[in-house]
Image: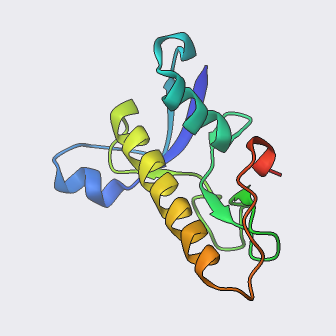
Amino acid sequence: MILRFEVDQAAAFRQGVNVPKSTNHLDVDPAKLSQEDRNLIADRLDGIDVQLLEVEIKSGKFIKTPARPGDLTKGRVVAKLPTFDSLMEAVKANQRDVEEELMLWGDEKHKPKPDLSPERLL
């Protein structure tokens, strides 16, 4: 399966890696991935795009980051290099960020409780 994500060209350049285009495509065999990695990617897939997750303010649910005006990444995950390992580092960092945000929601009584069910994605 082809996965599309963004690459931080400046970060790659600093590491001596030439990345001619910021949008990257990787052919990945899901059968060769761990269940955890498959779940992390599947939660973020929109077609072939690997989208960032964020917490929707009104509901406290995970949503895929929509493309916003002026956002050149179109809501896609941004990796430091055009490799699967770098993609997974970015996906796992996004997962940590979303989980931290959900924990903060639980500390504030005036905000709705987050939905942690498997159907948490809209």
Task: Determine the residue located farthest toward the top in the rendered image.
Answer: 31
Determine if residue 23 is in view: yes
Q: Where is residue 4 in the image (x, y as percent from the top left)?
A: 57, 37
**In this orientation, which residue lies closer to the viewer: 70 or 120?**
120
Is 103 above or below relative to 2?
below
Q: Where is residue 15 in the image (x, y as percent from the top left)?
A: 17, 49
Determine if residue 22 is in view: no
Quadrant for residue 53, please give it.
bottom right
Is 81 above or below relative to 39?
below
Is 55 above or below relative to 44?
below
Task: Determine the residue located farthest toward the bottom in the rendered image.
Answer: 110
Q: In this view, does 20 lie to the left or right of 78?
A: left
Q: Where is residue 43 in the image (x, y as percent from the top left)?
A: 66, 41
**In this orientation, which residue lies closer to the viewer: 92 or 60?**
60
**In this orientation, which residue lies closer to the viewer: 76 or 95?**
95
Please tell me which residue is depicted at 63% across the width and 76% down the height of the picture.
105
Please tell me which residue is depicted at 64% across the width and 63% down the height of the picture.
54
Specify the color scheme: rainbow
Please tell me which residue is depicted at 62% across the width and 68% down the height of the picture.
71
Q: Where is residue 11 in the image (x, y as percent from the top left)?
A: 27, 57
Is 57 above or below relative to 19?
below
Q: In this view, does 90 lie to the left or right of 42?
A: left
Please tell me which residue is depicted at 71% across the width and 69% down the height of the picture.
68
Q: In this view, does 68 lie to the left or right of 100?
A: right
